[in-house]
Image (cartoon, rainbow, N blue to C red):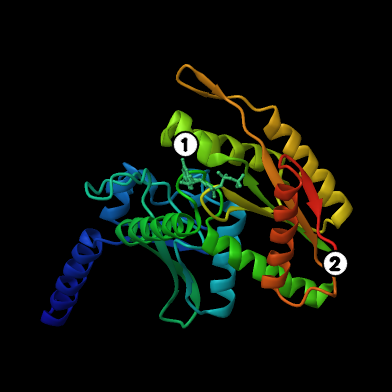
Amino acid sequence: MNGTALDEIDDLHWTLGLIQNLEVGLVVVDRKACIKLWNGFMANHSGLPAQDVVGEKLFDKFPDLPTHWLHQKLETVFLLRNPAYISWEQRPYLFNFKNNRPITGYSKFMYQNITLIPLTSPTGDVDHIGILIYDVTDTATGQIALENANQKLKKLSREDRLTGLNNRGYWEECLNREFERYNRTELVSSLVMFDIDHFKKVNDTYGHQAGDEVIRAISQALQIQARKTDIAGRYGGEEFGAVLTGTNGVNAMIFAERLRANVESLLVKHGEYQINCTISLGVSELNEDVESATAWLEQADKALYQSKQNGRNGVTLFSV
Ligand SMILES: Nc1nc2c(ncn2[C@@H]2O[C@H](COP(=O)(O)OP(=O)(O)OP(=O)(O)O)[C@@H](O)[C@H]2O)c(=O)[nH]1
């Protein structure tokens, strides 16, 4: 053997060593999806050494693979002779490997980015594809945790702590949006505002904690009665609002009256006491006479004030 041949063998030897020890998975398959190369990364994570895998059909050896999808991807790479990239966001993993990172141990599996590379033979044909598997568990779990934290923050910024209802800021935003929507679609909506009657007396008689229990119980009654499309919020200390989308004034009055009766029949337990409360409600239908979201709110508030004037524990529909 001459010097050049020895050099080439030497080059091949260290190239193979490099491939075997890469911290990236490498699988080479032919046109029949027969496995030609299976590097150390793949052996370590699958528990299957190269001698058990090389020469086998990929889909026979790994029946859990997304056969149809991967087959199509491989065919496209053979046909177009262009690489294909699949990120963990499109498909969390190709091979179901356990996540063995101690820091990101809360993910059960290894997130993977995948690259499919067409491999050209000396004749210029593409008869093989290299499948590269990158372990991106750290990036993926970090990004998922960040997204979850953002979702939680968003929820917290919109939520009233005591009741879990929308807080005033977010509820007003929804009210404004509903008003804008009405201007575009003219689909009717109604607003119900209500306030707990003589609530100061509840606090003074049973204490602030008991008052909080009453607020929570009434909020729950509101949440149970509201539809998914209704927008319920805590407007102030003991004042609440509900935007009833797609509901006219007459039906909003039925809603309000049912809620009034529900609250009237509630008995809120606090220690040895059972506290009974009532609410006063005002209803305002959104129609072309209402000039702004603020005007809509003022109308419902006027109707609520009328209910208080009428002796409380009642419902009033705003009229000019
Ligand atoms: N426990 C508790 N009390 C609150 C909260 N927010 C406001 N309040 C109390 O609600 C009471 C509201 O009293 P008022 O505005 O005088 O009204 P009211 O006693 O309900 O009388 P009317 O509305 O006229 O029937 C006050 O005593 C506030 O301290 C809260 O989050 N928890």
Q: Quadrant of the N terminus?
A: bottom left
Task: Report the side of 166 relative to 286 (left or right).
Answer: left
Residue 203 % position (x, y): 47, 36
Residue 75 % position (x, y): 59, 68
Check mark 2 vs ligand 1: CB closer than 8 Å? yes or no: no
Residue at which label 2 appears:
320
107, above or below 156, in the image: above
Residue at 79%, 77% (x, y): give it: 184
Kind of residue at disc 1: Asn
Task: Report the side of 185 relative to 29 (left or right).
Answer: right
Q: Regarding mark 1 in the picture, which secondary structure is present there?
A: helix
Q: CA distance from mark 2 to mark 1?
A: 35 Å
Residue 142 % position (x, y): 33, 59
Residue at the far top: name it: 272
Residue at the far left: name it: 3
Residue at 74%, 64% (x, y): give it: 299
Depth check, front residue: 39 or 97: 97
Residue at 41%, 81% (x, y): give it: 122
Disc sitting over residue 36 in the figure: none
Depth check, front residue: 168 or 226: 168
Q: Regarding mark 2 in the picture, which secondary structure is present there?
A: loop
271, above or below 189, in the image: above
Of mark 2 and mark 1, the one earlier in the sequence is 1
Kind of residue at disc 2: Val
Disc sitting over residue 203 in the figure: 1
